[in-house]
Amino acid sequence: MRIGCCINSLDELTAAAAAGFDYAEVPTAALAAGEPDEAFEDNRRILLDSPLPVEVFYCFIPSALPLVGPSVDRDALRSYVRNALARAASVGARLFCFGSGRARRCPDGFPLDRAESQIADFLRLCAKEASPLGSTVGLEHLNPAEVNTVNTLGRAAELARDVGSPAIGVVADTYHMLSAGEALAAMADCADVLLHVHVAEPDRRPPGTGETDWAELARVLGRAGYRARVSCECLWDGPLTECGPRVADLLHTALGS
C-alpha cells in the first residue's frame, strides 16, 4: 500500500517528501488545463523535477465549469478534460479524483435525478478521453453538508458501474463516509470500482487525532483486495514538516505498507 499526501501548493512537495510520504496528490489547477500550453510549462518542470512522485490530481473540475443544471457547456468541458488528462500523463500521472462539489451542485429547482444523470454523462465523456491514455477518473462521494449530489460511496459506485468503463471508478473518503454516517465496510462493497482512497478524521483532522479505527480500515481494504494508494487529505494542525512524519508513520504502520 502506498501512502500519499494531498497538498495545496507545489511549494509543499519538498515538505511532503521529507515527511515520509510515498507520493503527492496535487490540485488539478496546477495543470492549467483551461489555458494555453505555454501556461503549463513552469509547473510541468516543477512536477517532473519533484522530489516526490506526483501520481494523483484532485479537485478535477473548477466551479467555473458547471457539470449540472441548465447551462452545461460540453464542448468546454471536453476541451478542459482532454488538456488535463494529457498534461497529467506527460508528467507520469494517470489518476484523477473527481469531487468538485461546486461544479456538481444541483441548482435550486433543478431535478436531482436529472443532475445525477448529467454527472453520469460527464463520466462517459471522461471515459472516452481517458481510455486511450490509460488514465482513470474516480468519482468521489461528498457529504450532504458540502453538496447535494452523490452523497454516499454506494451511490457513486452505482453511477460508475452504469458507465461501464475501466477508466471510471470511485474514490472512497473516510471523512465523507463518517460525516454521512456510512460505514467503512461500504468500501468492500464497491471493490469492483474502487480506484483510490482518501483518509482523515472527522472535521478533516489529521489521522491519529481522533477515534477512527485505522485497523478496521486495513481489514476492510483487505476484504476489498485493495492494495493501491491511500492519500491523507486533511487540515494540518501545524507545519507539514512537523505533523506529516507522525501521520505518514501511522498510516504506513496501520495499513501494512
Image (spheres, helix red, strand yellow):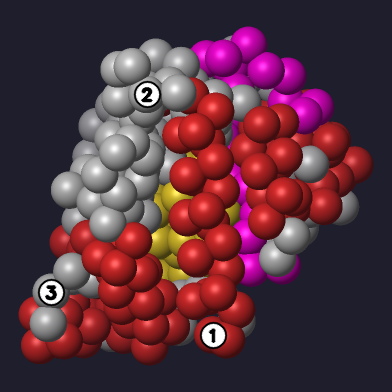
Location of mark 3 (residue):
35
Q: Tag count in the figure?
A: 3
Location of mark 1 (residue):
133
Location of mark 2 (residue):
110
Q: Residue lying at the far right in this picture: please name it.
A: 223
Q: Real-space Cα distance between discs 1 and 3? A: 21 Å
Quadrant location, the C terminus: bottom right
Q: Amino acid at mark 1?
A: Leu
Q: Is residue 163 above or below residue 222?
A: below
Give the secondary structure at mark 3.
loop
Tell me where residue 82 sits by quadrant.
bottom left
Give the secondary structure at mark 1.
helix
Q: Position of residue 168 (x, y in %)?
A: 63, 60
Q: Real-space Cα distance between discs 2 and 3? A: 31 Å
Q: Amino acid at mark 3?
A: Glu
Mark closest to the chain's N terminus, 2 or 3: 3
Which disc number belongs to residue 26?
none
Residue visible at 56% across and 61% down in the picture: 124
- The residue segment tinted magenta is 166-186
Q: Nearer the viewer, mark 2 or mark 3?
A: 2
Mark closest to the chain's N terminus, 1 or 3: 3
Mark closest to the chain's N terminus, 1 or 2: 2
Tell me where residue 238 sits by quadrant.
top left
